[in-house]
Amino acid sequence: MDVYAGLSDRVLVGDGETWADRLQGRTVECVAADARAPERAFVGTVEAGLQRTTDGGETWTEALATDDRVTSVTVAPHDPDVVWAGTEPSAVYRSTDGGESWTERGGLTDMPSAPRWSFPPRPHTHHVRWIAVAPDDPEQLYVAIEAGAFVRSPDGGATWDDHPDGARRDTHTLATHADAPDRVYTAAGDGYARSDDRGETWATPQAGLDHRYVWSVAVHPADPEVVVVSAASGPYTAHSTTGESYVYRRTGGAWTRAMAGLPAPDGLARAVLATDAEAFYALTNHGLFRSTDGREWDAVGPWCDAYDQVPRGLAVV
């Protein structure tokens, strides 16, 4: 198991039992890697563009050189050489050669909803918080703008469909599943939502979800009905190591808290969730945790006081 765990000011690279600090001093925004090319990983930063490693995290170089924040990065499920990146101000870039070269997919901010996009801590701007690709269609793109819109492209970013009625406007994380290719899962500041028709219409099952500021979402690799989210009462409690957050699980009915084995909610920053081929993972400011069912969690390896930071991204390959 290779783990790339992004914290506020560094990336931890390891096998869960031992860690090496990489990119120390960089402000980390996002992390992506793929099991088909586990030695290659991407880290979006505030001040150093999109960083890439091709040797399992030993060395890093700037793959996408930009003065903009790189706020999202995704490896396509169809081809590990196809990588998508998003920035602040909002723009989407694509690489088809594993991050060697990039092209911007224009027109994103030409949509009618764009004048309303605004990120509250920096209200003069906005960014691409997450990019997802439909598992059965490499051209079907889903993009979360923080804050203001969920937008889609049917043709790999050549054209864009604006925010549909009913979609969340403050989406943080998107997920898809190979066994339910029409489905899109959304974790948002304005709650959880799910679409079963590629983002056209939305359901918002909230029963049992006592905390509606939802940050991360992951779906069981073998069952598209088993969904896990991290959530808090609001952004101030979510994005703080002195705040309070929870993990919830849903299998089609009401949400239930899924905290067995996780640290106590007090002092727990919202977790970043991920999956590999078998299990869920939750990166917290108190360590990395693994669950085969999303209900009960086990700590993975050691943790130290220097790592008590707000988690920013996670890839397990």
Image: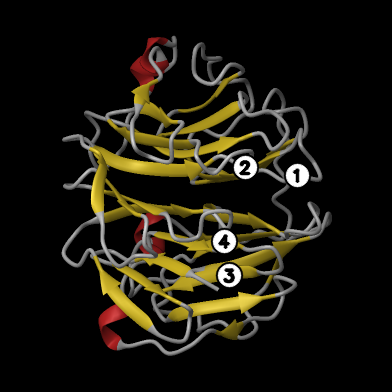
**Left or right side of 304 for 291:** right
Q: Earlier in the sequence, mark 2 or mark 3?
A: 2
The residue closer to the viewer here, 303 or 49, is 49
Tell me if label 2 and label 1 are in contact, CB under 8 Å.
yes
| Above/below status of 303 relative to 112 | below
Dot 4 or dot 2, earlier in sequence: 2
Query: Is residue 308 visible to the viewer in this orientation of the structure?
Result: no
Q: Nearer the viewer, mark 2 or mark 3?
A: 2
State the image coordinates of residue 213 (x, y, percent, origin top left).
Answer: 50, 53
Q: State the mark number for residue 274.
A: 4
Find the distance from the CA under tag 2 to the CA under tag 1: 9 Å
Q: Residue at x 28, y 64 (%)?
A: 8
Q: Which mark is residue 178?
A: 1
**Quarter of the image where the C terminus is located:** bottom right
Q: Quadrant of residue 114?
A: top left
Question: Does the CB distance between marks 4 and 3 fall below 8 Å?
Answer: yes
The residue at which mark 3 appears reads as: 281
Given the image, on which type of amino acid does mark 1 rest?
Ala
User: What residue is disc 2 on?
Assistant: 77
Which label is found at residue 129?
none
